[in-house]
Amino acid sequence: MLSFLPSAILMPFSFLLFSLNLAVIGSIITIGGLLKWLIRINAFHQILYRPMHFFYRLWALNNYLIIMLFNRVDWQITGCEQLNKDSWYLLIANHQSWLDIIVLSHLTNKYTAEPKYFLKESLKRIPFLGVGCWALDMPFMKRYSKSFLAKNPHLKGQDIIATRKSCQSFKQHPTTVINFVEGTRFTQVKQQRNPVYSHLLPPKAGGIAFTLATLGTQFDKILNVTILYPDTSYHIMKDVLKGRLTRVIIKVEAIEINDSLIGDYSNDSTFKSHFQQWLNAIWRKKNSTIKHLSH
């Protein structure tokens, strides 16, 4: 709507609106989180669930409206015809930008149950966002290098414990568990360090394997989501703030869950190899899709 204005005008105003949306909604959700922490009664937590997630969905809607206020965007969303808000989904997606979280929040707002992101531990320190996500029961994961774990073996497996604990809480309400399986945002520099795929980073299988092991029979489908911003520069979020986002492509592929995807990833080497091969095949197909849509 206002994309005709100079970027020097659009950028500070759009940034301000995004920040206000996060601050106001994040503060409200944080109050709910503090109540949960003070009153540790499960029945009370269930009462808070719907209003807290209402405000999360309001945050997602506001973000969409801000994007559309400052950008002229063509949303090309396919594959959502059979999705519903009463089902459990495990959503895996490629990761390029902070915008991915806003885009997936918009997608789940329209088509699925409440989203729960697997987040990096460092995000807890971001004002409003960190405490708000904690209040919404989103799991925070600590990533340790092999060398660090060799020096601190007592920390090995802590991410698995956190995954299983979080997944147990997801059984009470329909949930869309979201995992950026690359573990970090894609950049050309990161891709060149491990050039297995031309448009993606290698996927990390452990997190979704443990999620499936815990909730596998409860998930209705795995949603393989491919996100692409074909007309943007390297700095995607900056383009959004400047009113330069013109096209968002979201392709959703629903994958059936069978017994071959549920097993002991830690101790069964045969299952681990099979699961990695399955995920790598999905990633090769996703890479081809992105390569095709980028031209």
Image (cartoon, rainbow, N blue to C red):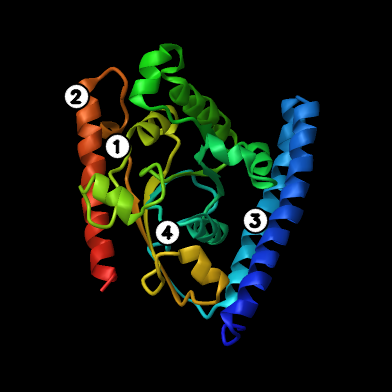
Q: Nearer the viewer, mark 3 or mark 1?
A: 3
In the rendered image, residue 39, in percent from the top left (x then y), is placed at 80, 27
The residue lying furthest to the bottom in this view is 4
Task: Name which residue lies at 79% across and 41% down.
Answer: 31
> What's under tag 2, amino acid-wise?
Thr
Tell me which numbered mark, 4 or 2, is placed earlier along the sequence. Answer: 4
Q: Quadrant of residue 15?
A: bottom right
Q: Is residue 273 above or below residue 219?
A: above
Secondary structure at badge 4 equals loop
Secondary structure at badge 2 equals helix
> What's under tag 3, amino acid-wise?
Arg
Tell me which numbered mark, 2 or 3, is placed earlier along the sequence. Answer: 3
Q: Residues within 10 Å of mark 4 (few under 14, many from 20)?
A: few
> What's under tag 1, amino acid-wise?
Asn
Q: Nearer the viewer, mark 4 or mark 2?
A: 2
Q: Is residue 12 above or below residue 201?
A: below
Cα separation, mark 3 vs mark 1, equals: 31 Å
Task: Name which residue lies at 70% across and 46% down.
Answer: 128
Residue 82 - label? 4
Cα separation, mark 2 vs mark 3, equals: 41 Å
Q: Which residue is mark 3?
A: 57
Task: Name which residue lies at 48% across and 74% down.
Answer: 245
Residue 270 - label? 2
Query: In the shown orientation, is residue 119 left or right of residue 34?
Result: left
Q: Residues within 10 Å of mark 2 (few under 14, many from 20)?
A: few
Q: Which residue is mark 1?
A: 258
Cα separation, mark 1 vs mark 2, equals: 16 Å
- Which image quarter holds the N terminus? bottom right
